[in-house]
Image: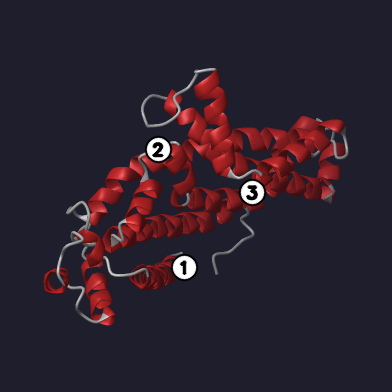
Amino acid sequence: MRTFLLRRLVMTGIMLVLVALTVFLLGHLTGDPVRLMVPDEATEPEMAALRRELGFDRPLSVQFVDFLAHAAQGDLGRSLRYRQPALALVLERMPATVELGTAAMMIALLAAVPAALVCAPRPGSVLDALASTAAAVGQALPPFWIGIMLILLFAVHLQWLPAAGRGDVGSLVLPAITLGLWPMARMARMLRSSLLDVLQQDFVRSARAKGLSERAVLLRHVLRNASIPTVTMAALTYGSILGGTVITESVFAWPGVGRLALEAVYNRDFPLLQATVLVVAWIFVVINLALDLLYVWLDPRIRLQ
């Protein structure tokens, strides 16, 4: 276990450096941020002075090494727009994104697991066909369109729920449904396929031959063996949700990390963009590590080596 964790931590460090390098290079390819920070009438000497002050006149390799050295100490730089520590700004927005992502995953799991458990023992039935069609439609519809339609129906016409912003529980409903619809459809289809495969195994027939009820066979024997692919997908999807809420947060004016990253791109705020991506990447890596440990609990035959 110790060797496994050490190996994963080393891989995590390498991965974070590569992510930081990619974001750093792509961010600087978009143009000179100093031109966005000065008024239109600013002269070239004034812009040059600001570049020297911010360190943008140094070679990119020197800037990147300096960034990594500070990042190792928990300093991800200062936002060019807000003039505050970038890491503090990201952590300030993170609770809103975690709240939205967790609500979306709960909606997805609470709908996907029962739907798969009901449909898998009845392949080809009308209920199975309806659920499969709904799952396919759910995966095909783009989130921004779903969000706009939900706003028009529940906020504009019915006036049941707020259209934007973060406040009470009601403000969380529409963005969580928008964000959770796609993973719900995806997980329902995968879990149904996994359940169908496991239902054909010999040990399932043996369990039935012992007189266990269909419900007991499904919940005690089939679900656990079929859950590994779905658990993998759920964990990776949760990590993707935390880093991919840009569209949903923009549609619903949700003050999360995704919206902050979008603002950083618009303003060419490199330190803030780097901090946003690195924090999300770290969360994603931690989720992957937890997933590997969860495999062993779900299936003891799996060994960490």
Residue where numbered disc 1 is placed = 4
Cα distance, mark 3 to mark 2? Answer: 31 Å
Helix, strand or loop status at disc 2: loop
Residue 239 appears at what percent x and percent y?
Answer: 48, 52
Q: Residues within 10 Å of mark 2 (few under 14, many from 20)?
A: some
The reply to whether callout 1 and callout 3 are in contact (CB within 8 Å) is no
Tag of residue 253: 2
Amino acid at circle 2: Ala
Q: Residues within 10 Å of mark 3 (few under 14, many from 20)?
A: many
The reply to whether callout 2 and callout 1 are in contact (CB within 8 Å) is no
Mark 3 or 2, closer to the camera: 2
Residue 102 appears at what percent x and percent y?
Answer: 47, 39
**Viewed as shown, does residue 231 lie left or right of 176?**
right
Task: Give the mark nearest the N terminus, 3 or 2.
Answer: 3
Mark 1 or 3, closer to the camera: 3
The reply to whether callout 3 and callout 2 are in contact (CB within 8 Å) is no
Cα distance, mark 1 to mark 3? Answer: 23 Å
248, 71: nearer the viewer: 248
Q: Is residue 195 visible?
A: yes
Amino acid at circle 1: Phe
Q: Is residue 74 visible?
A: no
Residue pictured at 50% horizontal, 52% vertical: 240
Residue where numbered disc 3 is placed = 230
